[in-house]
Every structure is written in structure tokens, then in C-alpha cells.
Amino acid sequence: MAMAGILLLLLGFFAANFNPTAAQVGVCYGMLGNNLPNAREVIDLYRSNNIRRMRLYDPNSQALQALRGSNIELILGVPNSELPNLANPSGAQSWVQRNVVPYWPSVRIRYIAVGNEVRPVNDETSWLAQYVLPALVNVFNAVRSAGLENQIKVSIAIDMTLIGVSFPPSAGAFRGEIRSYLDPIIGHLAWARTPLLANIYTYFSYADNPRDISLQYATFTSPSPVVWDQGRGYQNLFDAMLDSLYSALEKAGQGGLEVVVSESGWPSAGGFGTSVDNAATYLSNLIRHAGGGTPKRPGRAIETYLFAMFDENQKPGPEIEKHFGLFSPNKQPKYQLRFGGGRVGDINASYNATFSLKADM
């Protein structure tokens, strides 16, 4: 067969196996390990496995340089420690000029996440709450001053502890004591037409309450709906949690706000309900599920970022925090996940086969 014919067959094979929803599921790139590959190797690993979106928790210059020309879309994080500085307009302008402008457009920054999981009441991060809204607005203004407001959206990342009522999903509501903190923030996001970023983990809900929450419900493997709410059947906990957030936004007067799931994952070791099998089941099912929406918002793909690229041996907190990686630090995949049609770890072999065929002709 002629070279052109074989290459067309190969391209057809890749196209037939390409899942655009899976390709749009991103992976968070955490760096809290002393044994991780360098940034260039990591970006190559994203590309070779067709992972097209990334969340980066701080403007690491090596990672940003390695991302140039990669076509990977990025959530760029502002570390919580930077929030007081960015609450000053000049600090925000300087941050954007230093960490955004020099890299755009060769780095496809999709969102800037101004802080992560700041909890305004009874938490070690509570002292930072006063800075989140001014930092958010100042970074937005700095991005607008750079002429990039139509390309880069500026948001914040919350966790589900801000929800006071989550069951049933239609009753979802934010905690009363955090409304004065959150309402102006989501009001700004709605005005700016920017999604709210939310970290959603069914694992922690399951581990905290295995009596009432089954492993099947938490890992997308329940054969039938477990919860019925206003005529909607919930077959998995992820949908129920996300719909409770949608309900909370409605009750706060911002029902039109979109949500991006900026973290979700399952640890493979270190605690109750952790195993490679459970993690693989959750992650593979979440990748497939992200294209279908929730019972409250059916048919609307859920932009989702898996946590995380690597096991991070210096991550603080309980032991489970060190075991969320899709890859081991030696770059070997822990699971067979499909991003855009190829299993993690298989796509390099496919491309190498293509190039080998081409070289032999």
C-alpha cells in the first residue's frame, strides 16, 4: 500500500477513536514533590497522552515556558499567599504584566483562579477572605487593561464546605454565615460572565459517611438511581453535589452562573475506601460522564479537571493527600484512562508506530 494510503487509514483510526468530551477533561499539575519530572517532561507527558487542559496552581516560570506553543489550555492559579498583594490595584497590574502578558498567546491561558479554597469562617485561610473580592476585581481590571478580557476569564476556586445544605440537591444552599463573603463574588462573576470554579470530591463525602453513601453511588457504578428529587433521578453522587451547588447559586440569585469543576479525584492509597481499583473506576467514569451534564442541567458538558497529574510526596495533610496522582513520579501511568481516544501511556506507542511506518516507506 502507498504511504499516503496507510497514513490516511491511521488518521481515520485516530479520528474514529477521538472523543472530544474526553479530550476536554483536564488534569491539575501539582508540584509538591521532590521526585517529580521537570516541567518540559511534564508538558510532553500531557501532550503525548492527549491531555489538552491543565490547572497550574502558581505562575511557575519553567512550566509556563514549557507550555509555549503546546496548545494546552490553562487555568493559571494565584496562590493564596499572593491575595493581600493583589488586593492592591498596582500589585494586580504588576502580577498580570509579569505572569500573563509575556506568555500570551503562546500559552493559552483560559482562566485565572484568584485563590483556592479560601474559607471565610473558622479556618486557617479565613484571614484571607477580606482580600479575595478586591484581588478578583483588580486582576480582572488588569487583564482588561491588557486587552485580554475576552480571552482570559478571572474567577476563584471554592470547595463544597461553603454549602450548608446539600441534600436533596434541590435544597442546596450556601451557609448563611458565608453569604456576605460569597454573594459579592458571584455577583461579580455573573456580571463578568465568568464561571465559578468549584472543587468537588465524592471521595470525602463517601469516606465521611459510608453508612449512608455507598461506594457505587460515589464512583458512578450504581445500576439505578439512588436518590429521587423533584422527579430527577440521581445515579451518582457527583451529579447530586454539583446540582446542590447549582441550587445554592439559584437561591443566591445567580442561577445563570456556569460552574467549572476545577478539581475532582480519588486517592489510590492512604485511607478508608482508597485503592487503585476504586480510583481507576471513579476517574474513568468521570471522564466519560463529563459530557452528559447533570439531572438539573442535562446535556451540558461539564468542564472538569482531574486531580492530579502525579503523586506528590510533599503534599501536607493526611496520607491520602499524597496519592491522588494519575501518574507515578517516574511518569508511569497508574490507570488506563482514555483522553481523546487513547489510553494513558498508549498514545506515544501509536504515534511512534505511525512514524515508524512512514520511515519504512
Image: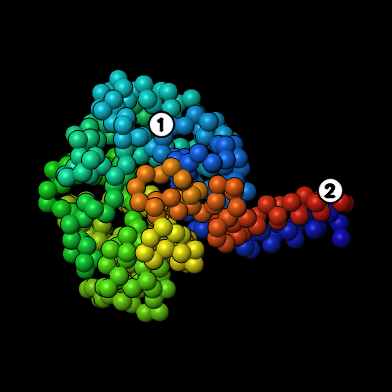
- Which x, y percent locates residue 1? 87, 60
Total numbered circles: 2
Image color mode: rainbow
How many C-alpha atoms fall within 10 Å of the one at disc 1: few (<14), some, or many (≥20)?
some
Judging from the image, what secondary structure is the residue with disc 2 in?
A: helix
Write down the quadrant of residue 218 in the picture: bottom left
Residue at screen point 29% across, 44% down: 117
Q: Earlier in the sequence, mark 1 or mark 2?
A: 1
Cα distance in 3D space between marks 1 and 2: 43 Å
Q: Is residue 42 left or right of residue 357?
A: left
Tell me the element at label 1: loop
Residue 215, label in figure:
none
Q: Which residue is mark 2?
A: 359
Question: Residue placed at 31% from the left, 31% from the top?
Answer: 81
Where in the figure is residue 120, as x and y percent of width and height? 19, 42
Work out whether 330 lies above or below 202: above
Front-most of residues 267 and 178: 267
Tell me which corner region of the image, top left, top right, bottom left or bottom right, holds residue 234.
Answer: bottom left
Residue ID at (46%, 45%): 313
In the image, what residue type sits under mark 2? Ala
Q: Nearer the viewer, mark 1 or mark 2?
A: 2
Residue identifier under label 1: 148
Q: Nearer the viewer, residue 171 or 120?
A: 120
Residue 195 appears at what percent x and percent y? 33, 47
Residue 240: x %, y % from top left: 29, 66
- In the displayed structure image, the side of residue 47 where residue 200 appears, left or right: left
Q: Residue at x 60, y 52 (%)?
A: 332
Determine whether, in the image, residue 171 is placed left or right of residue 204: left
Quadrant in which residue 14 is drawn: bottom right
Q: Amino acid at mark 1?
A: Leu
Q: Does the CB distance between marks 1 and 2 fall below 8 Å?
A: no
For the question of whether residue 73 can be seen, the reply is yes
